[in-house]
Amino acid sequence: MKTIFITGASSGIGRATTKYFAERGWNVVATMRSPEKETEFVDSDSICVLKLDVENKATIEAAVAEAITRFGKIDVLLNNAGYGTMGILEAATDEQIRRQFEVNVVGMIQMTRAVLPHFRSNQEGMLINISSMGGKVTFPTMSLYHSTKFAVEGFTESVSYELASQNIKTKLIEPGAIATDFGGRSMDFFFTESLTEYKPFTSAFLGKLADMEKDPAYASQASLVAETIYQAATDGTSRLRYVVGPDARTLIDMKENSGDEEYMKNITMHFGLSSSH
C-alpha cells in the first residue's frame, strides 16, 4: 500500500486530496496546523492526522519521522499548504510580504528538504508541488502571490534535474480558480483608503472580480484538482506540468500563444482598468 504525505490537509485541495487517495486504497498522512480540530479523518485506519506548520521546521521534522514510523515509507510528498494575498503593493506591510514567501516558498522548500533523504534512501519517490495558473499568468493586485507561485514553478522545474538522478519524480499542479475558502480564510487583503490615487483602479478591479465570483462557472471543484493529483502520482510518465480547470487552460494558452503584451492588454480590458498596455 502506497503512502502520500499532504501539507495543508484541513481544507480545500488538501482535504479533497486526502479523501480521494484514501478512497483508492492509499495511506494518507494528512498534516495541518490544528489537528485537534479535525473530526472526520481521525477514525480512519489509513489516514494519519499530524500537526505540521510549514513555518516551523521542528514540526516538519517531527511529522516526517512520525509518518515513516506509522506507515514505514512515504512514496509521494504533496506540498499543498499555501495562501494568497491581494492588494496594492504600497499598502503591504513588511510582515505580509515576508509571510507570503515564508509559507508559499520557504515552507515548501523546507518540507521538500525534510523528505528527500528518505526518498534517496529508498531510491525512489515523488515530489508534487501545488502551483497555480498564477505561476504562469498574472492578474492585478496579486503581485506577492504571483511572485511566490512563479518561484514554485522555477524551483520545481530546476530541482527536477537533480532529483531525476536519484530516481525521484517531480510534478507541478497548476489549478485555475477553485471553489474553496481560499478567497476567505486563505486570503490576506491589503487595500487601504489612504492611497487615494489607486482608488479608481481598485474600485474597477474589485467590482469586476465580485461579478466574476457570482458566475456559477467561475471556479472548478477541489475534487477535480484531487483527481489530477492522483493522475500525476500514478500515470507513470515523466510529465512535469498538469493544468487544472478550463480557465487555467484558456489563460495559459492565451499568454503562450499571443505573447505578454496581448495577454496583459486583454486582462486590462477585462477588468475595465486604465493602462498603458
Image: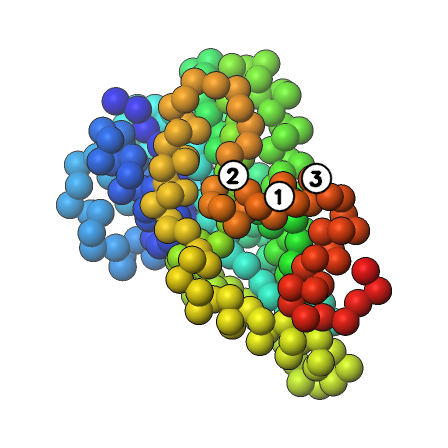
Viewer can see residue 6: yes
Q: Secondary structure at mark 3?
A: helix
Say what amino acid the circle numbered 3 marks.
Asn
Say what amino acid the circle numbered 2 marks.
Val
Q: Secondary structure at mark 2?
A: strand
- In the image, farthest residue toward the right: 276
Residue 22, picture quadrant: top left
What is the distance, in whole Å, between disc 2 and disc 1 at their CAs?
9 Å
What residue sits 74% from the left and 78% below the top?
A: 198
Residue 64, picture quadrant: top left
What residue sits 43% from the left and 18% below the top?
A: 236
Q: Secondary structure at mark 1?
A: helix
Q: Is residue 176 left or right of residue 33?
A: right
Crowdedness of circle 3 by 10 Å Cα count: few (<14), some, many (20+)?
few
Q: Is residue 155 left or right of residue 245?
A: right
Crowdedness of circle 1 by 10 Å Cα count: few (<14), some, many (20+)?
many
The residue wearing badge 3 is 257
Q: Nearer the viewer, residue 41 or 184?
A: 184
What residue sits 62% from the left and 43% below the top?
A: 252
Are the residues at dot 2 and dot 1 in contact (C-beta closer than 8 Å)? yes
Query: Which marked residue is nearer to the observer: mark 1 or mark 3?
Result: 3
Are the residues at dot 3 and dot 2 in contact (C-beta closer than 8 Å)? no
What is the distance, in whole Å, between disc 1 and disc 3 at their CAs?
8 Å
Tell me which numbered mark, 3 or 2, is placed earlier along the sequence.
2
The residue wearing badge 1 is 252
The residue wearing badge 2 is 243
